[in-house]
Amino acid sequence: MKRKIAISLMTVGVIFVGFSMGLLLYNNHESSKAQESSEVLVESIRLSIAENELEESIVDPFDEEMTIKEIDGYGYIGYISVPVLELDLPVMSDWDYSRLKISPCRYYGSTKTDNLVIAAHNYKFHFGYLGHLQPGDMVIFTDMDANIIYYTVDSVELLQPTDVDKVKDSGDDLILYTCTYGGAKRIVVRCSYSE
Amino acid sequence: MKFKKTVTRLLSILIVSVFCFTLFFVSGFAVDINKNGSITLHVADSEEKIPLQGATFRLYLFAAAHKKSDGVGYEYVIPYDNCNMDMDNLQDPYLPVHLAYFALTHSLPYTEITSDAKGNIVFDKLLPGVYLILATDILENYFLPSPFVVNIPIYNHEEESWEYDINATPKMQIRYEDVQGEYTYLSVKKQWDSDEEIPEKITVSLLRDLQEMERIELSEENNWYYRWDKLDKQYTWNVVENAVPDGYKVSYDFSSNAIIITNTKDVEDETTTMPDETTTDEASSSPDESTTVPDESTTKPDELIDTGQLNWPVPVFSTAGLVLFSIGWIMLKFGKKDEETV
């Protein structure tokens, strides 16, 4: 009897460990896929920006919307660079969960209204190391009109998922956020324009 | 003997813990949809954080809560079920605008309270459901806050429980003095998502701080497009479709200055308006579109996006697995020794 219990426990233990290892491998695979697509997309965006620069365009002074370019069926507003984390990532114009698997997405706002909020998965090569940023670190956003906007990190904080107002109505020029490892909270990086 | 007892106790605790843990995550978290809740608004200057007395807000109940296996679902109450906008995403920023226009034009019942000296407004004894909150009278030099929706209960990830007493802070922003005399524009584009013949025209209303300022028609003649220029930047401007054609649902997609209004043929309406075609087995056995269970975003609205991978089971299950395996291995080893000594 005792032997049977022991074997059952060992079997359940092996199943648990196997499940967690499988999940770990799946998460790593998803993260690697996101990294590959990001690298390709950033290059496509850079190319698109270079082509835009050659074309003359009329700028509507009232237009607070950012220029959106479509690549592979998705609209993009530019790409974000975080030198200290060695990140160059595309930014989609809208978000949903399928888009977030490919690229960081605009959650809210615009660079033209000084309230852009970008959300991304906590994949290793997306915003997985966002919490490592420190006040003073540089963040650069390049929009589809080739405007390069420099920001400085002001603070890094943890918020509850329900703290929507603290993100949307924050008064910050740029906010980057992602989930903590367990997903219970959000790591929020607040940035302001840098000269 | 003593060792055997200890192992048995340890094993019992572990099995009960694993069972409770599994039950906790599988069964969903207990929610009581008959429990009353409250919504407290903290009306304060968004920058200075000074409480504002004398701001009046209205509360409309537009959807009732019902229990689901994995939480709470919501369904429009009469007559909001005729507002022709799907409630599948409570975070849709245009849902409150559309509902506010619907409630105001239909003079639907509401509760109205003015903020006290501390800037507080408490709507209490509220049944679980989804509520529309809109400001009707605020201090003169402030922008009218956008209408918003609050649902009761809200799931608290930190406490892992449902909250029935909700706090909300409307955005109270002083009207910019430096935009006096400045103008913005707003354009509206109409799209149809239907294979059938579409109406010849529709009318849309331009709203200034939710008050109807102008109605215009969109049709093939103007390419289903219109643009208002010279809109005073001191106000919030919106466009809503004021009479959604029968058999269509409306959805809005907007950026700062452009609104796309899409009318989609409503499948549910087709089945109810053509009863002869709904007598087939397939139609009668398929669930009503209007009672479709809302997705996760509906049960846990007003939250920042869940951008996390499913990581937490990795340490939990690997640790639990190793512990179980070790206990089994120890039991097996000592069991053999016991047998040898006997």
Image: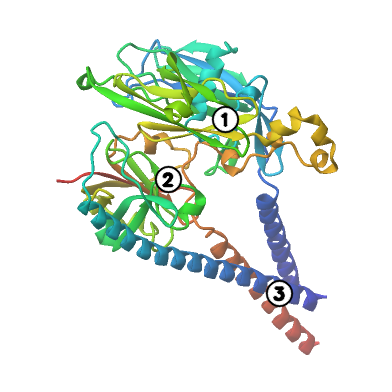
Q: Amino acid at mark 2?
A: Asp
Which residue: 23% across, 40% down?
Answer: A58
Per the image, the residue denoted by label 3 is A11
Q: Amino acid at mark 1?
A: Asn
Quarter of the image where one finds residue B3 = bottom right
Which residue: 37% across, 65% down?
Answer: A40
Q: Of all residues shown, which one is farthest toward the front?
A: B221
Q: Amino acid at mark 3?
A: Thr
Whether residue B147 is visible to the viewer of this picture, yes or no, is no
Give the mark nearest the N terminus, 2 or 3.
Answer: 3
A58 vs A68, nearest the viewer:
A58
Q: In the picture provided, is B85 more to the left or to the right than B188? A: right
Which residue: 38% across, 29% down?
Answer: B187
Helix, strand or loop at disc 3?
Answer: helix
Q: Are marks 1 and 2 on the same chain?
A: no
Q: Disc 3: which chain?
A: A
Q: Of all residues shown, which one is farthest toward the bottom?
A: B340
In the image, residue A127 lies at what x, y percent? Answer: 38, 56
Label 1 – label 2 distance at C-alpha: 24 Å
Q: In the picture provided, is A117 more to the left or to the right than A161? A: left
**Front: mark 1 or 3:** 1
Quarter of the image where one finds residue A89 = bottom left
In the image, residue A64 lies at what x, y percent? Answer: 30, 35
Q: Tag on residue A94?
A: 2
Helix, strand or loop at disc 1?
Answer: strand
